[in-house]
Image (cartoon, rainbow, N blue to C red):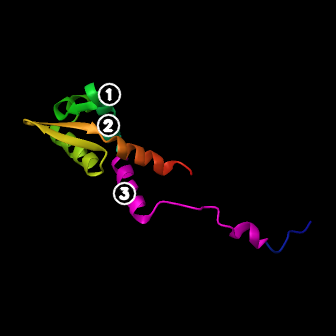
Amino acid sequence: MSLPTTLESAACCVPRITSSLSVEEAERTAQIFKALGDPTRVRLLSLIAAGPGGEACICDLTEPVGLSQGTVSHHMKLLADAGLVTREQRGKWAYFALNADAMEAAAAALRAG
């Protein structure tokens, strides 16, 4: 039995990828996925989504995740910086809601075609 000594060049050189994310889109999407790379932040997003009206006060997020208010605030800042949540100050409390456009953009980045 002998093996072929050459490969057909046409089979391996035809580009199969016709489009991809731009550098800017890839950087933005990576920032979103980096923010989602922590289980506490994913849980916080889930808690916000399940909250009345799709929002939650920072004061309602600390107990369910078992972390201090300062630590939860740090996580929420990272989520806000990534654009995954919006923040509204009401008196002394901050209220957070999901940014549906950013969530959809993250999901769309993974879809083919």
Q: Which residues are magenta?
A: 8-37
- Given residues 65 and 92, the one toward you in this image is 92
CA separation, marks 2 and 3? 18 Å
CA separation, marks 3 and 1? 26 Å
SS at mark 1? helix
Residue 24 vertical position relative to residue 92 in the rendered view, above or below: below
Q: Residues within 10 Å of mark 1 (few under 14, many from 20)?
A: few
Left of 109 or right of it: where is 46?
A: left
- Label 2 is placed on what type of residue? Leu
Mark positioned earlier in the residue sequence (3 or 1): 3
Q: Which label was assigned to residue 62?
A: none
Q: Residues within 10 Å of mark 2 (few under 14, many from 20)?
A: many
Dividing the picture into quarters, in which one does residue 54 lie? top left
- Given residues 63 and 99, the one toward you in this image is 99
Dividing the picture into quarters, in which one does residue 62 lie? top left
Furthest toward the left, the residue is 91
Q: Is residue 24 magenta?
A: yes
Q: Which quarter of the rendering shows the N terminus?
A: bottom right
Give the x, y percent position of residue 43: 33, 35
According to the image, label 2 marks what residue?
A: 45
Q: Magenta span: helix, strand or loop, mainly?
A: helix
Q: Which label was assigned to residue 50?
A: 1
Mark positioned earlier in the residue sequence (2 or 1): 2
Left of 4 or right of it: where is 45?
A: left
SS at mark 3? helix
Give the x, y percent position of residue 16: 64, 62
Give the x, y percent position of residue 100: 35, 40
CA separation, marks 2 and 1? 9 Å
The residue at the point 42 percent across, 48 percent down is: 106
According to the image, label 3 marks what residue?
A: 28
